[in-house]
Image (cartoon, rainbow, N blue to C red):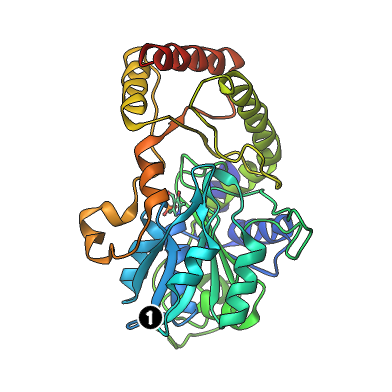
Amino acid sequence: MLRVLRGKWLSMGPEVQAFESEMSEFLGIKHAFAVSSGTAALHLAYLALGIGAGDEVIQPAINFAAAANTTVAVGATPVFADIVGLDEPTIDPDAVERLLSPRTRAVVVMHYAGYPGRLAQLTELCAHHGLALVEDACHAVGARYLDPSQRPPHGAQAGTVGDIGCFSFFSNKNMAMGEGGLVVTNRDDLAERLRLLRSHGMTTLTWDRHRGHAVGYDVVAHGYNYRLDELHAALGRCQLRKLPGNNARRQQLVAIYRQALSALEGWSIPFAHYPGESAFHLSVVVAPDTNTRDCAVRHLRSVGIQTSMHYPCIAGFSAFQRFATNEIDRARAFESRAITLPLFPTMTVDQVDETCRQLTLAARQSD
Ligand SMILES: Cc1ncc(COP(=O)(O)O)c(C=O)c1O
C-alpha cells in the first residue's frame, strides 16, 4: 500500500498489471482483466459476447442478483433454471436443455459456495447448441472441477472453462479486497472486447500515454469505467498469496461442521459427496422444513450467532417477477430450508463447535 502511495500512480498502472499477470498465472488462463467488481465483470462478459435485446440468458434460479441484473442491463431476458437438487444447488444442465429457445444466447453457471457446477455437461451442451458459457465464479476463486468420469474439463480451475469467467473480490469473498473483480478468457477476440469496454472503448490508457507508449486515443466502442485502482490491486496481490492457506483453513472448518452436524435427523449439508475441489466459500445446511429452519435461525440469533441465506430465488424479487415463468421447485424448496452458517478463515474451532452445539439444541427443540 505504502509502495503504491509513494509511487504516486493511483489507477491502472504497474500494480494492476502485476495483479493481472499473477491472477492469469494462478488460474492458468490467457487473459485476465482487473475490474471494479464482479458485477462489472459479468456486465462486460455479456457486452463482449454481443448479448443484447431479444436474447435470452439461461442462469441459475439460486444466485446473487448480479448475473440477472446485468442481463437486464444489456437488454436481454434472464431465464431461470432449476438447481440440481437440495444437495447440489447449482444449475441443472437438464433444466437448461428444457429451457432452450431460438433466442437463447448464453448459459451462466454459478459455482455455488465454491463448488464448481456440472461443467462437463454444460460445456457439451453449449458447444452442441452454439451457446456461450459464462462462469460466475465469484464464490470459487481457487476451486477446481474434477469430473467423476474424468471427462473434460477435468482438473480445470473454476472460471477458466467457459468463454468468459467472472470473479468478485468483494469484502465477504474468499479473496477479499473491499471491492474489485476480474474477468478472464482464453479467447483473443473476447479479450480485445473486454479490454476496450472496461475503459470507455478507448484504444489506449493514461498509463500507456504516460510511459510514452502512445500519444492519443480513439474511442472505438461504447464502454464504461470499470477500471481497478492501484491500491486495490496491491491488496489483491497480498490476498492472492494468502488464498491457498485461507481456502485450506475453510476446508478444515467445513469438515468439522460436516462431522458435527451429520447426526442431525432430517438435516443435510449440500455437496456431501462432491468429487471436485471446492473453494469452501460458504457453510450451508438444509433444514427438514421451513419452520425448523426459521426456529433455528431465531435461536442462533438469540445467542449471538449470525446466519445468512444464500440465496432467495431471484424470480421471487419484485423486479424479477415478470420473468418468473419456469418451474423451479427444487430452488424454491432450497430457499425455504437453507441456512448459511458462519465461516471465515480466522474462525476458531471453538466457534464452529459452539455454532454446531447451538444448532443441535435448536434442532432438538423443534422436534
Ligand atoms: C455469486 C455472485 N455473483 C456476483 C457477485 C457480484 O460481485 P460484486 O459484489 O463484486 O459486484 C457476487 C457478490 O456479491 C456473488 O456472490
Q: Is residue 162 above or below residue 318?
A: below
Residue 20 placement, left or right of 147 = left
Given residues 209 and 45, the one toward you in this image is 45
User: From this viewpoint, which residue is outermost toward the right?
Assistant: 150
Which residue: 46% across, 88% down? 218
Number of residue marks: 1
| Callout 1 secondary element | loop
Q: Position of residue 237 (x, y in %)?
A: 63, 48
Q: Which residue is mark 1?
A: 55
Q: Is residue 153 visible?
A: yes
Q: Position of residue 63 (x, y in %)?
A: 42, 52
- Name the kind of residue labelled 1 in the image: Asp
Residue 156 lies in what quarter of the image? bottom right
Residue 72 placement, left or right of 137 = left
Residue 252 placement, left or right of 333 = right
Q: Position of residue 297 (x, y in %)?
A: 35, 24
Which residue: 41% across, 77% down? 200
Residue 278 lies in what quarter of the image? top right
Q: Is residue 151 above or below residue 310?
A: below
